Image (spheres, rainbow, N blue to C red):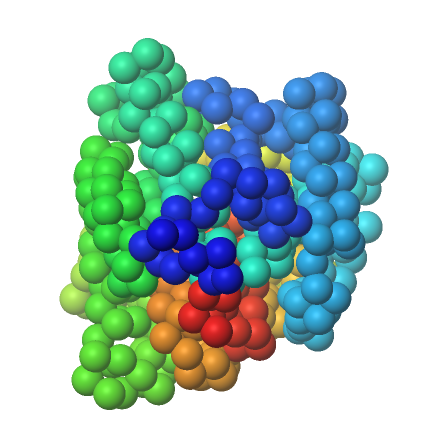
Amino acid sequence: MSNTASLKRTERAPLSAAFTRQGIATAIAALLLAVILVSFRPFDPAGVQLAGDSGDIVNQAGFGILGAVSLFSLTTLTDGRVLRGLLSPSWMLMLGFFMFSVMMATDPASAMRTASFTLIAMTAMATVLALPKDADDFSTVLIFAAVIVIGLSYIGLVIFPNAAMHTAESAEPEHAGLWRGVFTHKNIAGPVMACFSFAGLYLFRRGRRFWGAVIIVLALNFVLHTGSKTTLALVPFSILMVMLPGMIGLRFCTPILFVAAITVTALGTLGIVFLPPMKHLAASYFPHLTYTGRTTIWQFAGEMLADRPWTGYGYESFWGTPLLLNQGQPFDRAWDVRNIVHGHNGYLDIAVLMGIPAVCIATYTFVIAPARDYLRIFPFKENIYLGDFFMMVVLFTSLNGFLESFFFRRADPVWMFFVLGLFGLRQASRRSFVPRRAV
């Protein structure tokens, strides 16, 4: 017998529920997350570059629609209190530095066009968080996006194998046979699938065991075939760092471990290049530690930053520009900096593009603020599960940012998950996600 007064967990929601105001909001959030991760040019190695190309009509139209749908949804389908809680003063200051770097660019008009893609994508991720009313709705969003992204990536391996995996004819033949799915590179596919494995764990913990298990298995299998040992190691590390303290009654230690992990990683990467004691230590005990030649890039970026420490070089005005293309290449330099698209360290790239003050604000916004938000999460089971998921994403992507560069990088899927995690922690500390049926 159907209970018309309140829908129980064992009963199926009628089809008409999908066409309610909240059903429509959830559907929009699910579509936004799936579209922004898949991009408007799936299975296209040039997709990321085209996203900033003002002459690409597909991305122009796609991002225009994405922005319009996001703004319309935020203003008509969300609670004003939720909307006001999305951005913090530190985020506003961070975005201020971002826009200042656009004005400082060598071509401000072109930089503004590219920056608009970044801002639209960030708005879309904020919408994904603001539209779901509770944990049930957000779980539906995650399941839909995971099915689309992971499903298309696996289907691509069969239908478009030359596009869904690196080949010997690609720009990096040494990666031949490694999977990249709908994404442009294995270094994007691996972290995205890792984040989906965290989503699967979240779903499993809150009772969606079938979907949770399927997503975990498929996502981790994909990570394995991207060939990224770092990503594969960071997944269990991130899970243990977040969940273990809570399992032994020391949940307050998670933010401490998070900040400690970021600090140690910073010392072990940038520290061995710019801090004499760390540099001497690395030379003595790890003389061949270069992170696949990345230390050469960081050294060069640091030398260039010394010329413009306060303002940087401007958004989209350093890597791949005539400033570097016209420079000579020393024979003993491990990487040719003239042909790379970023500095393989997101924090250093913020300093190079926006200045040292900007990276100080970024450190607070990306590290201190989420640690504080995690401590303030509402003491409800649903909020705790959700907070753990977002913290895993933030921890994993923050550590990944020391070897790759994706901060403010248009609609880079890893950047999108990072934004989702940061905004999500803020939301979990400010509103309840307890499902309506449990209230």
380 with respect to 104 (left or right) = left
Report the residue that reaches farthest toward the front. 1
Q: Which is more toward the observer, 315 or 88?
A: 88
Q: Which is more toward the observer, 173 or 272?
A: 173
Q: Residue at coordinates 62% horizontally, 30% vertically from top-left?
A: 51
Q: Quadrant of residue 68?
A: top right
In this rendering, the answer to whether 100 lies above or below 34 is below
Q: Residue at coordinates 62% horizontally, 58% vertically from top-left?
A: 130
Q: How many marks?
A: 0
Q: Residue at coordinates 30% horizontally, 71% vertically from top-left?
A: 242
Q: Quadrant of residue 361?
A: bottom right
Residue 416 percent across, percent down from the top left = 52, 48
Q: Which is more toward the observer, 128 or 58?
A: 128
Residue 8 percent across, percent down from the top left = 39, 59
17 with respect to 395 (left or right) = right
In this rendering, the answer to whether 28 lies above or below 83 is above
Residue 325 percent across, percent down from the top left = 59, 31
- Res. 15 in view: yes
Q: Quadrant of residue 244?
A: bottom left
Report the residue that reaches farthest toward the left. 285
In this rendering, the answer to whether 44 lies above or below 185 is above
- Res. 366 in view: no
Residue 15 percent across, percent down from the top left = 50, 38
In this rendering, the answer to whether 380 lies above or below 195 is below
Q: Which is more toward the observer, 166 or 73?
A: 73
Q: Residue at coordinates 76% horizontally, 63% vertically from top-left?
A: 96
